[in-house]
Image (cartoon, grey):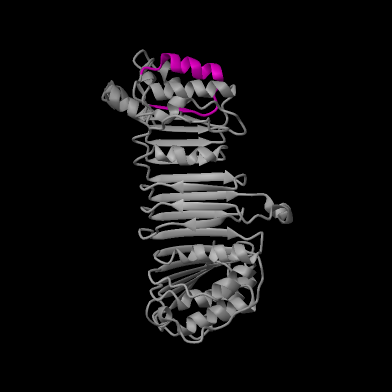
Amino acid sequence: MEITKKYGRRNLSIDRLSELPDSVLCYILSFLPTQKSVATSILSRRWRYLWTDVPNLDFVDENQGTINRVLSLYKVQKIITFRLSDKIDCHDYQIGTWITFAIERNVQNLDIWRESADVFLPRSLFTSKTLVDLRLHCCGKFPNIGGAVSLPLLKKLRLVFIRGYESLPHLLSGCPVLEELVLYLSFEYRSFTISSPTIKKLVIDIYSDIHEDPDEMYYTDYSLEIDTPAIVYLQLSDSANYHIKFGSVASLTEASVHIQDFRNHCLYSRSVVEFIERLSNVRCLNLDLSHRAENIHSVFVARTISFRNVTKLEMTTDCRFLPKLLENADNLEILILREVNEKIDRWMEPQQVPTCLVSRLRTITLFRFVRTKCEFKAVKYLLKNAEILEKIEIVYPCYLTSKKRIYMLDKISSFERGSSACEVVAYVG
C-alpha cells in the first residue's frame, strides 16, 4: 500500500490508496468477499468502518454470529448484491431473517445457495420493488404464495431444485419485465407450464433417476408446456422424458436441446420430433440425441423438417441423423460433430448432394468423432462434396495415443476434397 521514493537524502512516502475518495475505495472493496472487506478495518482509523458503506455483501464461509454482527453495523440502505454461499454455518430459519434484511435494504441482486435445507422464504421476497436478479439454490420449498406477487423490476430468475413448482405460474404472473428464466428441477410433477410474454432467454434442466429403473417410470401424461412468444434463446435438457409443447417461436434464434430417451417409446419419440420441428426457424442449433435414439430416428426420417435458417449446427448423435439434417439445412455454414457413446455403424449417403454442401458449408469441426467406419465414411462424403469448404478441424481426445492421432490425420488428409482451399487442422482438446 505504501510506496517509498528516495530523492537524495530524503525519503518521500506516498500512500496512493489514501489519496482516493471513500466512494472509490468502497467500489474497490465491493469486489471482495465481505470477510476480506471487513478485515481492512485494521489498517487505520479511516478504514475502520469503511466496509460498512460497501454496497455488496458476499458471505462465503462465515458462521451465524459473524454475519449477524456484520449486519448490525452495516449502513448501506440500497444493497446492490447480497449473496450467501452453501458453506454458511447457520440454522435454516436464520437465512429467512437475512433475506428480510436484504429486502428491507432495497437489494437489487439476491443469491442464496443452500444445500438440502428448508429455508424460510419470507413473503416480502415476492413483493420486492427493487429486485432485479433473484437466484435460489436448494432453498427448500416455495411457500404458498397465495396473495399478490409483485416483482416489477425482476429481469433474471434462477431456481435450482426448489420444491413447489405448482406456484411457478403465479410467480411468473407477477414479473412483468422478466427476461431470463433458469430452472433446474427434479422429476416430481405430472405437468407444469411456463408462460410469460417477456422472457427472452429460457434454460430448463429436468433431472431424473428413471434410468435406474425405467420400467417403473412409464408415464404418458407428464408434460411441459412453454408459452414464451418473445423467446430468443432456449436451452433444454430433459432426462425425465416429458412431453413438450411449445407455443410461438417466431423470435427464437438459438436453441440447445439435450434429450435422453429412457423410455424408447414411439409416443414419446413422436413428441420429441414434433418439438424439434418447432425449432425450424433458429439460426444456431445444438442437438444432442446421443442416448437410445432408435425410435426418435425412425420418426425423424419419416418427416420433412426444414431448417432453412440454420447457419450453425452442432450435433451429438450417431451418423443416422446427419443426412436428413443436411438435406434440410440449405444455409448451413458451420457443422460441429461430437462423439457419442453408442457405436452405431450406419451411414447412408443422401440421394443427391445437399445444397449446403455445394454453396454454403465453410467449416467442419470433429470433436472426438471419427472412431468407426461409419464415421469415416461420413467425413469422406462431406470432404468430397463440400465445394467451398475452408477448414476441417479434428479435435483429438487427450487419451488417444500419438500413433492413432497420426493414423486418423493421415487417413482424413488422404480423402478427396471438393474444395481446393480446404485445410485440415488437428489438435488435442
In this rendered view, identify the residue nearer to me: 427 or 166: 166
**398 lies left or right of 132:** right
Looking at the rendered structure, the number of numbered marks drawn on it comes to 0
Inspect this view and state whether residue 295 appears: yes
Q: Is residue 63 visible?
A: no
Closest to the observer, 40 or 112: 112
Q: Residue at image x 44%, y 35%? A: 134
Q: Residue at x 48, y 81 (%)?
A: 383
Name the residue nearer the viewer: 328 or 146: 146
Q: Residue at x 58, y 69 (%)?
A: 369
Q: Please check the rendered image and state whether residue 238 is part of the magenta-colored stretch, yes or no.
A: no
- Residue 74: quadrant of the picture: top left
Q: Is residue 384 left or right of residue 48?
A: right
In the rendered image, which quarter contains the N terminus? Answer: top left
Query: Left of 408 or right of it: where is 179?
Result: left
Find the magenta span and give its range: 56-75
Tell me which corner region of the image, top left, top right, bottom left or bottom right, holds residue 419. bottom left
Picture quadrant where residue 294 is located = bottom right
Residue 13 at what x, y percent from top left? 30, 22
Whether residue 72 sits left or right of residue 138 in the image: it is left
- Across and down, in percent, residue 157 comes to 44, 40
Eyeballing the image, is 46 above or below 259? above
- Where the C terminus falls, by quadrant? bottom right
Q: Residue 353: x percent and y percent? A: 46, 85
Position of residue 186 measured from the top left corner of the image (x, y, whole percent): 60, 45
Looking at the image, residue 4 lies above or below residue 419: above
Residue 60: say if magenta.
Answer: yes
Q: Nearer the viewer, residue 247 or 255?
A: 247
